[in-house]
Image (cartoon, grey):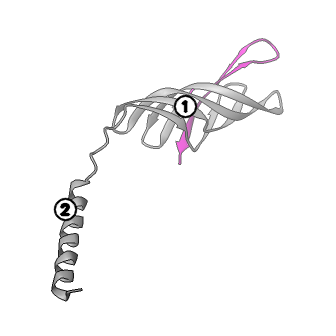
């Protein structure tokens, strides 16, 4: 094989590969305003008769601004009620700013048929 012809083929292949590389640029992804999924979060919420440790669960949030979201979520929790610790699943509205979440978990009813609500704060990591 002729060495000059080989160099021309190599040069042509290099030019074609550069051209193909430049034409395959990615388009920027449009950012969605709705966010759904699981997240790593730990929180503490309290009321006049309950203290609860909450962890992140499934959530659905709507992005209002860059660092501000509102939504609803489910939080697996340990609650301290009537001098006992119970595992419960809480449902809560969420207000998120940067990595901080403000929550108001609802746990259902207690033994006296009263609704169990708490207010708290969480940190997303």
Q: Secondary structure at mark 1?
A: strand
In the image, residue 108 lies in the stretch drawn in magenta: yes
Residue pictured at 81% horizontal, 13% vertical:
112
Question: Which sits in the foreground, 37 or 121?
Answer: 37
Q: Quadrant of residue 41?
A: top right
Residue pictured at 84% horizontal, 32% vertical:
84
The x, y position of residue 125, in whole percent, is: 53, 48
State the residue lying farthest toward the top: 113
Residue pictured at 63% horizontal, 37% vertical:
44
Q: Is residue 104 above or below residue 15?
A: above
Q: Earlier in the sequence, mark 2 or mark 1?
A: 2
Question: Which sits in the foreground, 89 or 28?
Answer: 28
The x, y position of residue 8, in whole percent, is: 16, 78
Q: Quadrant of residue 89?
A: top right
Left or right: where 27 falls relative to 75: left
State the residue lying farthest toward the front: 1
**Which residue is labeled 1 in the image?**
59
The residue stretch that appears in magenta? 104-125
Q: Is residue 19 visible?
A: yes
Q: Secondary structure at mark 2?
A: helix
The x, y position of residue 121, in whole percent, is: 55, 36
Q: CA distance from mark 2 to mark 1?
A: 44 Å
Q: Quadrant of residue 115?
A: top right
Residue pictured at 21% horizontal, 82% vertical:
6
């Amino acid at each position: 094989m002729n060495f000059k012809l080989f160099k021309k083929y190599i040069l042509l292949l290099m030019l074609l590969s550069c051209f193909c590389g430049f034409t395959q640029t990615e388009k920027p992804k449009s950012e969605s305003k709705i966010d759904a999924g699981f997240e790593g979060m730990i929180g503490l919420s309290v009321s006049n008769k309950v203290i609860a440790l909450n962890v992140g669960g499934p959530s659905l949030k709507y992005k209002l601004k860059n660092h501000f979201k509102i939504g609803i979520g489910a939080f697996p929790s340990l609650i301290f009620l009537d001098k006992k610790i119970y595992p419960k699943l809480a449902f809560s509205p969420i207000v998120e700013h940067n990595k901080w979440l403000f929550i108001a978990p609802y746990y259902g009813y207690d033994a006296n048929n009263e609704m169990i609500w708490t207010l708290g704060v969480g940190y997303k990591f």
